[in-house]
Structures are given as structure tokens and as C-alpha cells.
Image: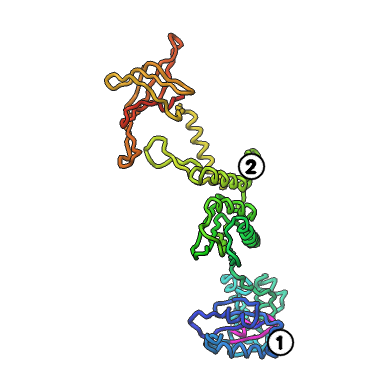
Amino acid sequence: MFACIHVQNSNKTLPLADFAYGFSPIVEETRPESVIIDIEGCELLFGSAYGLANEVAARAERSPSDGGLATKVNVAIAANPDAALHAARLLQGVTFISPGEELTCLGEFSLEALEYSLVNVEAKKSAELFETLRLWGVKTFRDFAALPITGIAERLGPEGVQLQQLAAGKSERHLKIRQPSPIFSNALELEHSLTELEPLSFIFARLLNQLCATLNAYALATNDLLVQLRLEDQTIHERRLVLPYPMRDPKVFLKLLLLDTEMHPPQRAVISVLLTCEPVKPRVLQNGLFIPLAPEPDKLELTLARLAKLVGEENIGSPALLDTHRPDAFCLKRFALTTKPESRRRRKAIGKRQAASGNQQCLGFRIFRPPLRALVQADSGWPSQISAWGKQRSVYGKVVSLAGPWRTTGDWWRDDRWARDEWDIALASGQGVNQTKVLYRIYRDLISGDWFVEGSYD
């Protein structure tokens, strides 16, 4: 048996679903003003199904402080949920429909009142069917239900059969129960405060197992884990783990969390632990047959975490150029995996650029790290002779051609400001017919006045 609760002429939003949960644990929010509940077995608490319906109507008129809605509602009970919905919407007060007597109660209703969306029929399609039925002279639920089902199927299709079953109160479906919103957060209050990492790791493992089980139940993963530790002085020690890709392995999370806690330990004893994550879709990657296998992302993340513990978080990452004219300026950003494959259009554009660049002559520049300190003979400010020696290479000879200088300066307000003149020079190598030219980039530091060889051109 099913009961439908429909609010009469209410212009305000009411907690109708919460009110219905007071009578049954199975509730469908069909409309903002209507809910359907499964009362199978619940009527025993009120003597009968009719007694339950009267109790629903009486309790709804009470004030919200007494568990009511402060309004009148229509209540209909039937063996079919859709029949109960139509009766509650179209009839006032309390209605009880015995099994098999649906048309006795609903038969005289106009077809315009038929809730076609209950059987997933589109509005445009239902309008066409209702217009066809009107031309046939069918006006009520009873008229529609009396038509032969074979003729309805041949002329109106499966949608017509579904609407006929709905009008006869014989449609079959399950209630669409409202699922509670998933909570991706776990907390634990400790009986005794913890000061060591080993007992705290057992708490982390327990909460992470519960959190990853919830993620797995909803086919989700996470790449953002928030840890909040409440300390004895009521302060919050907060740490956030941001991963380059989503995952849901509690063992990997535990190792990362322990490494992070070792690097950033709380200053007081811990009395409660809270773990929260942001759910995202899991990572799905299809590797090509001829693409070399990369290291597993979880093992790579653990390796980076261990390295960060040894050398510091600021010294781990991927180098990225800074938006500045400072020579050789770069920073370290967090390492991230690129999992989105390039589109076909982008691959074609890259191929065209590579083909176009293949027909051009490009110079490769080999930078010396560190640059070689040089002695330069500059006649009238122009380099004419150079000599520089390092542990692995040496540069010396007469300058046979040059280009420059190009002056670059910047960050004059900082202690590490730079100002230098750059030159491209060619040194003669060999003698006679075997003589060749080697191209180098040199520069003079205007602050110190020293000369350096920055690199060579291929």
C-alpha cells in the first residue's frame, strides 16, 4: 500500500519530505507539493491504513514546533502509487482506494489531469496523444481505460499503452527514494591525547579506510585531502595534501600523510582528528601500444614525498620559466601528470609546425653551468681576444667576428639586480684550409666588470 500527501494551495516551501519520514522510512519526493510513502506494515502502528491517513491529515495541521506543517493536506491511500497521487491531487481530504477499485475513484477525471511524466512520456508527445484521443471522443480516465489495449498499441504506440495503464491505475514502477547526500568526511574524538606518530598512524589508517570505502562505493576518487588535528590548547593544526592525480588507495594516503606529519608535526598533543576530501572522477588513461610505460603515479608520488622530506618541499618539483627577462630565471612548481590526450586537430597542427621548422636552419645553444670566467681584451670596448678555462672545457682565441652588444638590466630595487652587455662572437679554430669558426655567447657584468662565457652555438 502507498499513501500520497499533497499540500493544498500553499505558496511557500514546506519540509514535506521531512514530515513524511515521520510515518515511513521510504519516501519519494514526486513534486514539491506532493510526496508518496510506502506504508506497508506501518499501518499497524495506527490500527489501519485509514487510521494512518487520518493521523497524517491531523498532524499536518499542527504547528511546526509540534511536528506539523501548519496547513491542510490531502491524503490518498491506494495499492498503486500513481493512483494515490492522482487521488490526492484531485480529491479533498482523506481518500482510501481499495485494490481493483481505482477507476471507481478516478474514472471521471479529465484526461488533462493525467500526470504523463510519471511514465516518462515527453510533453510534446503526450500533447499529440491527448489530441488524438480528444478526436476519438475520449475525455475521461474511464473512457481511456475502456479502449482495447491492442488497438492502443497499434495506433498510439508504447507511449499510448503506458498512458492507458496510468489512467487505469495499473502502472507498475518502484518509488524513487531520495538518497542521502554522501559525506566524504570522517572524524574521531580521542579518549586520551596522543603525542607520538605511531599511535596517531592507527587513527589515520582507520579514518582513511572508511573514507576510501565511501569513495569506492560512489565510484569516485580524490586528489585533495584535508587533515585537521585539534590540539590540547584547542587550536587546529591543519594540513592539506594536494595530489597531481585522483586516487582512492588508503595505503598510499597513509604513507603520504605520515611523511607530511613528520615534516610538519603538531606542536601539542592531539585530542581529535578530522579527515575531509573533495570527491572527483577517477583517473582513466588508455596507453598506446608504442608509448613507453611511465612509472606508476602512486609510487612516483611516494618517491617525491620521501625526497621532499630529505631536501625540503621547496627543492622538489618541475622547473618552469619565470615571466621575466632575468637570464636563466626559473622556479620549481609542483609536479603534475598530463593525462588528457591531445586532440587530433592539435596533433595535426603540431605536425605541421614541426614539418615547417624542419625546413629552417636553427641554432642550438649549449649553456655552460656555471658560466666560464674569462679574460677579454677589449680594444675600444670591442672584444678582440678571449681566454677562459674551466674544469671540463676551455675557450680561447682571437675574435674574428662579433655582433652586439645587447644590454639587459632589471630588478634595480633588489639586492640581486642584474645589468650586463651580451655579445655573440666567432673564434677561429684551426689553421689554413682547416680553419673553422666557433660561435659563443659572452657577456660583461656591468656591476662587477667581469667577463663570462655563457655558452656555445651548435
Q: Is residue 66 left or right of residue 51?
A: left
Q: Position of residue 442 (x, y in %)?
A: 38, 26
Amino acid found under the numbered disc labelled 1: Leu
Q: Which residues are magenta?
A: 74-88
Amino acid found under the numbered disc labelled 2: Gly
Q: Is residue 79 above or below residue 349?
A: below
Could you say which quadrant of the image residue 422 lies in?
top left
Could you say which quadrant of the image residue 454 lies in?
top left
Instruction: Quadrant for the N terminus, please.
Output: bottom right
Q: Is residue 332 above or below residue 250?
A: above
* Distance in Å between CA atoms under marks 1 and 2: 63 Å
Q: Position of residue 47 (x, y in %)?
A: 70, 90
Judge by depth and name the residue closer to the eye, 64 or 343: 64
Dot 2 corresponds to which residue? 288
Q: Is residue 431 above or below residue 125?
A: above
Which dot marks residue 86? none
Number of dots carrying numbers: 2
Label 1 or label 2, whichever lies nearer to me, is 1
Q: Position of residue 426 (x, y in %)?
A: 39, 20
Judge by depth and name the residue closer to the eye, 189 or 332: 189
How crowded pointer 2 is (Cα within 10 Å; few <14, some 14-19, many 20+) is rated as: few
Residue 10 in sight here? yes
Q: Is residue 39 left or right of residue 242?
A: right
Dot 1 corresponds to which residue? 44
